[in-house]
Image (spheres, coloured by chain):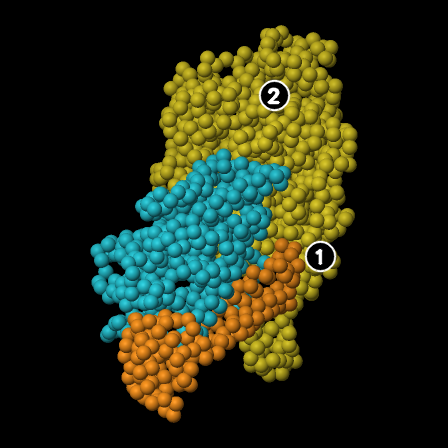
Chain colours: A orange, B cyan, C yellow
Amino acid sequence: MSRRVHVALFEDGAELVAAANACSRLRIPIVDAYLPFPVHGLDEAMGLRRSRLPLVCFGGGLVGLSLGLALQYWTSAVDWPLNVGGKPFQSFPAFVPVAFELMVLCAGLATAGALFVRSRLLPGHVGVVVDPRVSDDRFVLVVAPAGASIRAADLRALLMEHGAIECREQIVTDRHVEARS
Amino acid sequence: MALDHAVLDVADTTPLIGGGKTIGQVTRDVCSPLERSPTRLWYGAFGAALTALLIGAVAVGYQLRVGIGTWGLDRTVGWGFDITNFVFWVGIGHAGTLISAVLLLLRQKWRTSINRSAEAMTIFAVMCAGLFPVIHMGRPWLAFWVFPYPNTRGPLWINFRSALLWDVFAIGTYFTISLVFWFIGLLPDLATLRDRASGWRRKIYGWLSLGWDGSARTWSRYETCCTLLAALATPLVVSVHTVVSTDFATSLIPGWHATILPPYFVIGAVFSGFAMVLTLMLVARKVMHFEAYITPRHVHAMCKVLVFTGSVVGLAYLTESFTAWYSGNPYERFTFLNRAFGPSGWAYWVMVLCNVVSPQLLWFRRIRNDLRLVFVLSLVINVGMWFERFVIIVTSLERDFLTSSWSHYTPTLVELGTLLGSFGLFFTLFLLFCRYLPMIAISEVKGVLPGRHER
Amino acid sequence: MDGDRPGRPWRSLSELDGTFVPFDPNADVRREWFDLPTELVDGITPSRRSFLKLAGFGFAGAALSACSRAPIEKAIPLLVRPETIVPGKSYWMATTCAGCPAGCGVLAKCRDGRPIKLEGNPQQSIGRGGLCAVGQAQLLSLYDAKRLTGARHAGDALEFSAADTELRARLDEVRARGGAVRVLTGTETSPSTRAAIDRFVGSFRDGRHVAYDALSSSALLDAHAATHGVRALPRIRLERARRIVAIEADFLGTWISPVEYTLGRRMARDPERPAEFARHVQIESAMSLSGSVADRRLALAPWQVGAAVGELARHVAARAGVKLPIELPPFDDPMAAQLEAIAADLFDHHGRAVVLCGSGDVAVQKLVNWVNEQIGAYGTILDLAAPSFQRLGDERALATLRRELDEGKVEVLVIAGVNPAYDFPDASAFRESVGRVGLVVCCATHEDETTALAHWVLALPHFLETWNDAEPVAGLLALTQPTVPPLKAARTLRQTLASWLGDARDDHALVRDHHQEWLAAHEITGPTFEQSLHEGFFEVAQNAATTAAASRPFRAAALEVPAVGALPPEGALAPVLHAQVGMPDGRHAHNPWLHELPDPITKVVWDNVAAVAPATAQRLGVTTGDVVRITAVGGQAVVELPLLVQPGMHPGAVAIARFYGRRGTDRFTRVGPQWLEAKATVAPGGVVGVDVSMLREASAVELSATGRRVKLACTQDHHSLTVPEHLAPEGGEVRDAVREVTLATLLAHPQHALERETTEGAELWPEDHLHAGPQWGMAIDLSACTGCSACVVGCQAENNVPVVGRDEVRRHREMHWIRIDRYWQGEAEDPRALHQPMMCQQCGHAPCETVCPVLATVHSTEGLNQQIYNRCVGTRYCANNCPYKVRRFNWFDYPHEDRLQNLALNPDVAIRSRGVMEKCSFCVQRILEAKLTAKEEGRSVRDGDVQSACQQSCPAQAIVFGDLSDPASRVSRLAQNGRSYRVLEELNVKPVVNYLAVVRDQEERRDGT
């Protein structure tokens, strides 16, 4: 899949956020932004929803916990109860540590897994490369091409005045998607 | 709580990152060492570490072939260097998680320049630690029996009441979560390396960076994920050393059978871990020329953590001795007198000197400013913490209930070789890490740089 | 579980088709072996499944038959009636121990035609079921590959027949010439052999039989010859005594017949009848086993034995109001007062008191006899009616022989079963004078110092592979039968001499015929040889009446004044060369079990040491582990030995165990694991311990430090229940692992002689476990236990406990499942030992079980703490967490130094591999055997059906094993006893071993234990 977009390069995250805010005020759809490190205020500017990873994390933990307790109870008290040091077959206090560890393990793995899947972070996957300097010191804002709401020249001007050092139209392709389709 | 307090009073004195670095400079500074061929110093260090590792491998190989008898253990002292080293290394690991997780939650900006290598240290230390429970078994080739898997023996499961088994799960979880956390932290920097590199390096880094493109959407999920993992890792790190301490606390040997052990072990772990971080950072700072990134301000912060945890450890020593006396339990009381004045008393005093007395010097700014002194102190503390574990494990076992079975433990060459080997393994891995991965979390450091307008 | 679910994993064919039943102890015993598929029985064509099943049985069978350790065709002897042998099933054969001349009855447990365990024969009146450590260890000596075989002359091996023809010729010419022929043996308790010897020497004009003992009681025999007109040892019936005074006689350890005396003493000291409790006083210079458990102990200067006995006699005379027939020099020694009290006490128990003396001085023994006469010991405790033949050595005859040898008079010397070149009073002189003998024939079991000098060497058999008989005491004919076909071509002295006289009968015939003669001589008709053989002995009834009947007149005229012992010069010490419990004389030097048996007193293994009093050590500036040079004053004999500081020693004496440093013990060089830091048990070409026989003539020795130190292989580092001064609170700390009560306390409140804290109601959780069937438990009466260590070797033999060698013991890695903790309490000058057998306490709340990650140690429904070797991964956590430290870890593989000794392994007990934990199992294999027998007989297990190996071997019957859930069982009753307590009870680990406090007839102790 590929599309024609406006790309603006910034040297400072704050400027990019300002530009993004301006765009959203003018109802110019922001496709995405590419940054060397997270810049605060951008989520709001782009109107991103809060991530649902915490739910995944909680679910994973719940599964791990119940799995741990069930495993320990079944093996020690049901499947083959053995008299170990005169302790009760169902020695709950002794089962707490393992149950806890399994909870943390499952929660952690679930969260990380969710991140990888949701953000398509997979081995061999090559992401959207708007500009190779993104991973160094460039902040890139990608907005929809000029359309009904604004003319291309105005859009460029708007971005430039917010400190964009470079502004161009280009076709972005997600090679990963391309490879699939 | 106490940690950010330890840092607050140095806030705003010096900048976190010196030399008015720009974002681009940060990238270059951290990446260029990896793109140059290694220095002679690195080769020297690596050679030394590898030698130590090989010595250890020979020692372990010999022990596996001939038997545990090649260690200095006996019918009374069943654990010596093996479990001492295990607890020591697990302890070392804790600082990494603490810095990356707890300080993250506490929003301690100063962590950014050290957390990467601290986390690496955690992973390598846990690897060293994990080695010992396996080789200390009489039949290590059956080590997999500690896992609950369906089998044709009944199925005969495992004993979930045994603290050793809790260890298996605690250490396993701890290692996995730390590794995941570390790798996720590495992703943006791997992307940076990928974009700077070419040829096969680019391929490898590209593969490892999982196609990271710095999209704002990814960044926002990424930050949530890190916070969640940090929130998980914080109780985890506490639980791990608590579980390790239950190896002793849940037994009935006087000197082991104590409820104070869990907090005591956890704080001890933080203490030793920070000492080790300090050691490594001070070396890396010089070797990799990171003076601008690891500034006196970091050193000061860590020194204060050491003073605090060191004092808590000292308090723990006092408390357990008081409990022994106040309990009126003759065996308990004897054990502690024996620790201090018995045949292995010297080890006890080495421990007190290194862990309680020496960190107090760090109260003085003059000493904190002298990085050579700080370096020496960090080494002293590491020695002391090793001895703490030795004292707890060995002196308690040597003389317990029946006087007829009292004995005295002395390590053999094989055990010394194994200890050396574990250090070899640790530093070999760490040096490789310095060579091939960014020692400093580039994206995080960029995050704490002052923006263009603030400059 | 239902077997029909498809794809369900299955672990046995029987489970696959649903017939699998987990082992249920109460199920029909045959079920656990096999279920025959019914379709086969019904003759229907077998299904694939049942075919597999049968095939499985086939393979299993093949595998099993391949597993047998010994080549069957060799191991099943035709001597034993074949129908008695079921392969894999044990059977018992009665025989007689020849470890020493005491002649305890033995039941040999045999399997597949070979003995695998020796146990005391309860019917036979010497051992009465007990068997000492040495006796237990004889099993291993049987399987000694280094034993001699066939005949040897001038270096080349021959058939016996060939040897006989040559020897007969030599003997005939000597006979014709009328040359002197001497047969030199030890105490020969076998009447048939004595007869053969007499016939042989009788066939020469100048033939004589000389017997001597390395551990001689010749003086005692001579004394009785003088005072009672019969050269015999009285049989000592200690069970009849109320007062026992032993002077330099370790009658519980090494003196004449320890097993017999141990039980006698125990019966005389029954805490259940405190009023009858016999007081035991020991007067000795070195600390002996008997001294360690005595009620009162006086440290006597070695040179004062005679004087002390004289003083005792004087006071007895005074008390008795009779005049001492001889004039004794005054005895000025602080001990005099105590001796007076003792004398009075003895006389007050007239007829119930006895004095035992180990002195080698005839005059002293005569005095002792006089004392015994005065206190009425003869005819009650000392039995001359049926005297003992357990020592027959005659020093005077020996002296004559030595003179003849020096003069070169002897033409033929036949040496059998003794090693004069090693244990003669002056071995060096013998070695040199034996060269003048024309023909030296040596019958021996091993290469030794003497065979090296002999012209002819003929192999002697081990008693477990021969026919023999013995008359240890008059009226008791004990028989010995082969339990295994001869492992070596060897021949008894009896048969050798017979064949030299042209008597073609084999041993079997000789012994059988003599049995009939013996019966005839005793005018007994009845038992056939087979009957006696089945019992292992035939005994003429004896009782107090017969003893009293034959009281002989006492010849006071024979008394003489004992020579005054030489006081050693200033700074010198008097050497006391004694026998050691594990090594009573040199012939056991090839037995690793005995070398690795911790000495009951010193706890040292694989060595003999020079023991001195703490004060002496301080004066000499030496301490335990220092190698000292011991020089005979006015002699040139010098030996170097490690020193050991021994409480209770007389400050003027140095005690050294004899019978070490035996030639050939370098065989133990490779005993124990070989690794980087290992030190060889014996240096190549070296020997175990040091031979000190050259000091025997010396009356005084000088000790000097060499500056060298060695780490002794000692199983105990801390020798007291009192914790070190500087680690104890004000007033010191004494641990109460061993409890004591005085006789006074016991008399006052027999029901609760000690207060014990109870942990009832200390449970944290409800008891939700199934306790089915008997709840096994044990009771150990510490008052009976003498620390003799028979149980240690008994357990070692029963449970395949390996020998680990000196270096491993030095590293505290001994493997014994039962150990005897020995604590010294009281002052260093007058200590008392507390011996405590310690084995797995089979705790109900076992700390070891909780900590094992892989469930390798769990609790059985019968209260056993089970160790599952093949599940163990060897974390050693269980051993760390064991408060009794009774768990043993296999640090290495411990193969037998001598592969033949694998035949001694008990097939019922698994051999533990390297890296697993092991420990006392309460002899679970015996429990199972008893249960299976009971089931086959359709009854439940009765009290006493199961005897643990340690219990069985105990000469003092101190250990009782049984079902604690049965209130009537002996063990339950003992557990309720007023003296009963459990070690570390306050930990609430619920041990099931009940110890009964030591009872001592002495005033309240000062150190507050």
| Label located before the other in sequence (2 or 1) | 2
Chain letter for mark 1: C
Q: Residue at x 47, y 67 (%)?
A: B227
Residue B200 point in image, percent of width and height: 25, 73
Q: Which image quadrant for residue C824?
A: top right
Report the residue marked by disc 2.
Answer: C298
- Between circles 2 and 1, the one closer to the viewer is 1
Q: With respect to residue C494, does B143 lie above or below? A: below
**Image quadrant in which the N terminus of chain C is located:** bottom right
Image location of residue B154, percent across then percent down: 58, 67
> Residue C837 versus residue C551: which sits nearer the camera?
C837
Q: Which mark is residue B54?
A: none
Where residue C336 sits in the image (x, y, percent)?
Answer: 63, 13
Dot 1 amino acid type: Pro
In the figure, is residue C895 to the left or right of A147?
right
For disc 2, the chain is C
Mark 2, residues whose alpha carbon is within 10 Å: few (<14), some, or many (≥20)? Answer: many
Which residue has dot 1 on it?
A: C766
Label 1: few (<14), some or many (≥20) within 10 Å?
few
Element type at mark 2: strand
